[in-house]
Each structure stands twice: as structure tokens, then as C-alpha cells.
Image: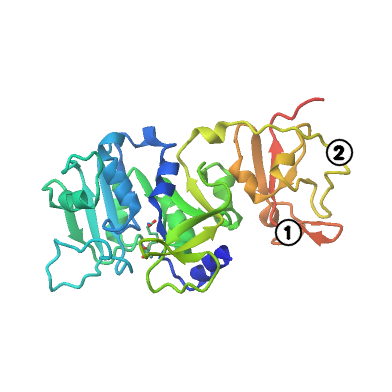
């Protein structure tokens, strides 16, 4: 299964999954007004290969960006695959950490889009600067200085460092839109951010899997892997979610609740005072107590409609901290505890 691959990749610290432009476009369209006059940082992105770079460079003027900064980690494994690095001396190793700072974008061939030819031109424009970095590690002092300068951080960070990556965004109080996974809210250090509405899901991915390009030496030995028509290897990954603290309309849409509470259909947990709701669509409209819902509830979460109380393992009054809830002795998979702020009176 593709998300088994994701876990295996995480364990092996294989972080080379490259985001498709279509996934970036589908999500970013929900946030355009947030970007006017802003400095955007893509800090896990080789500007020569990253579609995040291509997206923001291509829409630099349309979005009204002030500045775009892309930093590339030492030794991105596809670096140089699409474009060579024309501005580095020939005898320097090809794989090196660098940053590209864009403050002016012109459509050089006048075709209305910034394509790969334009990227080379962009770098040659005196107002834009390509320079080397020590390591390009997002945690390094040189990258933290760029983080401080940025208004919004947008990227797909390394899967194996997601916790650390989010902790750093929080420490520097940054606006962000990043790719993560559906299990992120179950992490002890990340859940409190969902609880306190400091992070939520973006709207464009709520089910299915997503295709990511992987390096040419990536083993193709699992379901979901393949080679596309351009000869690039890819993997399809389940459970992908956008994580953000930028507001969007979808999180203010009310979930239409059509079920009614009955003690038979909504049993109590053995070890916690809440009812079990196995599917988000089945949340009863007339129940005013605490309900346990699957983590996919977060795809529909509207903070005006519901209050998040906690998550099973770590909720304050769990009699067996760290353990999940049971019904009739049977363990129930991860549950978020919520309350309807305006239950219907029937
Ligand atoms: C999941 S890939 C995504 C790449 C690109 N952002 C995209 O979406 O196509 C994560 C990238 O982060 C890079 N990376 C790994 N560790 C890093 C670190 N400590 N600092 C910055 N980048 C890192 C990897 O080399 C990899 O290219």
C-alpha cells in the first residue's frame, strides 16, 4: 500500500517526494488574497525542480508578491535533472545548497507563462539573486534568518522531519501552507495546535491518494509506484493533507447534520464519558454532549459549528492515559472528541 511506503520512507528518512503542479494549483487558489504584498519562502525547494517555485514565479505578478525566496537543501537528489546550474562555476560540484531570491518577474518570451526558459532568465535578471548556502537545512541559522524575513512559508517539507518543521514555524509565529499527512493530528505535540485552532486542513485534498515524483533510484517494488510517459518515476501516496493557518472559506461551511441521537445507535465508551460516532456524516444534530469522531472529521471541521475537546489518548480525564477508548472491551481506532456548539432542539 502506498501509505505503507510513506511510513517506510519516513523510517528510512527518504524524503524525496516531489509535488505535482496540479496539486499546488488546486490548493493555492483558495488563498490568493493572502499573498498580496507578501514575501513567500519555499524552504525545502530546489528552485530548478520545485513546482512550488514554478507556481510562485509564474504567478509572481498576478499574486502581487513582494519577494519569493527558495532554498535548496544540500544534495537534493534530482538537482540538475531538469536544468543545469548555469551560474555556478563549472568545477564546483553540481549538488550544492543554494537560495534564489526573486523580486522581479518578466515573461521573457511573452507567452503568458513563466516556463523553464524564463526561470533561467529570471536568475540572470540583475534584480534576482542566486547564491550558495552552507547547508540549506531549514534549521540552520542562514535559513532561520530567511524564515524571519518571510511572511508565508509554502512547501512540502521532509516527511521524516514534519514535527520539527511545524515546531519551528510555530516558534517563529509564521503563516504557512504545507503538505503533511492525515496522521499529523494524532501526534502528541501537533494535536494541541488543532485543539487551539492554530492549524487546520486545507480544502483541496480530503480523500484518495496523490501522485509524487520520486528520484530515479527509488525502488519501484510496491503498489502505487510507476513510471509516467516522460520516464519519471512516481509513487501514489494515501493520507496526504494540506496543513495551514491561513483562513479559507471551506472551514466556515456548516456541515449538514441529518441524523438524530439514539442511545442504541450511538453507544457510550467503556472508559470515557462520550458517545461513539463512527462516521462524520452521522454526527447527530441534537446531541449536546461529547462525541468521539474519526480523524477525518477534520476535513469538515468548522470552528463556529463544533468545539474540539481533545483526542482519545491524550485527553485530560482519560483514565488510562496513552490508551484508546473501548466499547464492550473492543478498542476503537483514534477518535477526536468534539461538541456541537449549537445542537438542535427537537
Ligand atoms: C518531500 S520533499 C519535497 C520537495 C519539494 N518541496 C516538493 O514539494 O516538490 C522534501 C525535500 O526536503 C529536502 N530536505 C530534507 N531534509 C531537509 C532539511 N533538513 N532542510 C531542508 N530541506 C530538507 C529533501 O531533500 C527534499 O527535497
Disc 2 is placed on an element classified as loop
Q: Which of the two residues, 174 or 50, is positioned nearer the viewer here?
A: 50
Image coordinates of residue 223 in percent, x first then y, are: 55, 67
Residue at 57% in and 67% down: 4
Q: Is residue 125 left or right of residue 325?
A: left
Q: Which of the two residues, 204 or 108, is positioned nearer the viewer here?
A: 108
Q: Residue furthest top?
A: 346
The answer to whether residue 173 of the structure is visible from this angle is no
Image coordinates of residue 68 in percent, x first then y, are: 27, 46
Residue at 38% in and 68% down: 215
The answer to whether residue 81 of the structure is visible from this angle is yes
Q: Is residue 5 left or right of residue 62?
A: right
Q: Are marks 1 and 2 in contact (CB under 8 Å)?
A: no
Q: Quadrant of residue 34?
A: top left
Disc 1 is placed on an element classified as loop
Residue at 71% in and 60% down: 321
- As drawn, the label of residue 324 is 1
Mark 1 and mark 2 lie on one chain; the one further toward the N terminus is: 2
Residue at 87% in and 57% down: 328
Residue annotated with mark 2: 262
Q: Quadrant of the C terminus?
A: top right
Image coordinates of residue 37 in percent, x first then y, are: 28, 35
Q: Tell me the distance, in whole angstroms, between the alpha carbons under discs 1 and 2.
A: 23 Å
Front tag of 1 and 2: 2
Amino acid at each position: 500500500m502506498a501509505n505503507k511506503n510513506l511510513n517506510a520512507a519516513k523510517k528510512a528518512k527518504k524524503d524525496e517526494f516531489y509535488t505535482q503542479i496540479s496539486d499546488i494549483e488546486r490548493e493555492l487558489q483558495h488563498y490568493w488574497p493572502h499573498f498580496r504584498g507578501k514575501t513567500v519562502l519555499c524552504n525545502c525547494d530546489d528552485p530548478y525542480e520545485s513546482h512550488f517555485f514554478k507556481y510562485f514565479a509564474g504567478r509572481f505578478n498576478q499574486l502581487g508578491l513582494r519577494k519569493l525566496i527558495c532554498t535548496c537543501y544540500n544534495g537534493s537528489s534530482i538537482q540538475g535533472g531538469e536544468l543545469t546550474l548555469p551560474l555556478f562555476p563549472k568545477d564546483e560540484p553540481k549538488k550544492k545548497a543554494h537560495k534564489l531570491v526573486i523580486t522581479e518577474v518578466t515573461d521573457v518570451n511573452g507567452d503568458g507563462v513563466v516556463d523553464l526558459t524564463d526561470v533561467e532568465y529570471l536568475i540572470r535578471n540583475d534584480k534576482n539573486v542566486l547564491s550558495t548556502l552552507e547547508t540549506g537545512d531549514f534549521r540552520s541559522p542562514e535559513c532561520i534568518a530567511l524564515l524571519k524575513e518571510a511572511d508565508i512559508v509554502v512547501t512540502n517539507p521532509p516527511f521524516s522531519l514534519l514535527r520539527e518543521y511545524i515546531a519551528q514555524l510555530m516558534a517563529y509565529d509564521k503563516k504557512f501552507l504545507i503538505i503533511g499527512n492525515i496522521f499529523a493530528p494524532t501526534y502528541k505535540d501537533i494535536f494541541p495546535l488543532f485543539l487551539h485552532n492554530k492549524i487546520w486542513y486545507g480544502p483541496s485534498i480530503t480523500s484518495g491518494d496523490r501522485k509524487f515524483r520520486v528520484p530515479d533510484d527509488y525502488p519501484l517494488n510496491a503498489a502505487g509506484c510507476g513510471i509516467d510517459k516522460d520516464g519519471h518515476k512516481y509513487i501514489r501516496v494515501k493520507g496526504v493533507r494540506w496543513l495551514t493557518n491561513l483562513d479559507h472559506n471551506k472551514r466556515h461551511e456548516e456541515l449538514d447534520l441529518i441524523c438524530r441521537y439514539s442511545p442504541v445507535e450511538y453507544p457510550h465508551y467503556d472508559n470515557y464519558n462520550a458517545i461513539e460516532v463512527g462516521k462524520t456524516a452521522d454526527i447527530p444534530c441534537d446531541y449536546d454532549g461529547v462525541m468521539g469522531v474519526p480523524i477525518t472529521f477534520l476535513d469538515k471541521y468548522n470552528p463556529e459549528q463544533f468545539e474540539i475537546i481533545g483526542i482519545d489518548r491524550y485527553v485530560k480525564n482519560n483514565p488510562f492515559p496513552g490508551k484508546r477508548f473501548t466499547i464492550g472491551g473492543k478498542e476503537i481506532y483514534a477518535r477526536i472528541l468534539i461538541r456541537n456548539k449549537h445542537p438542535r432542539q427537537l
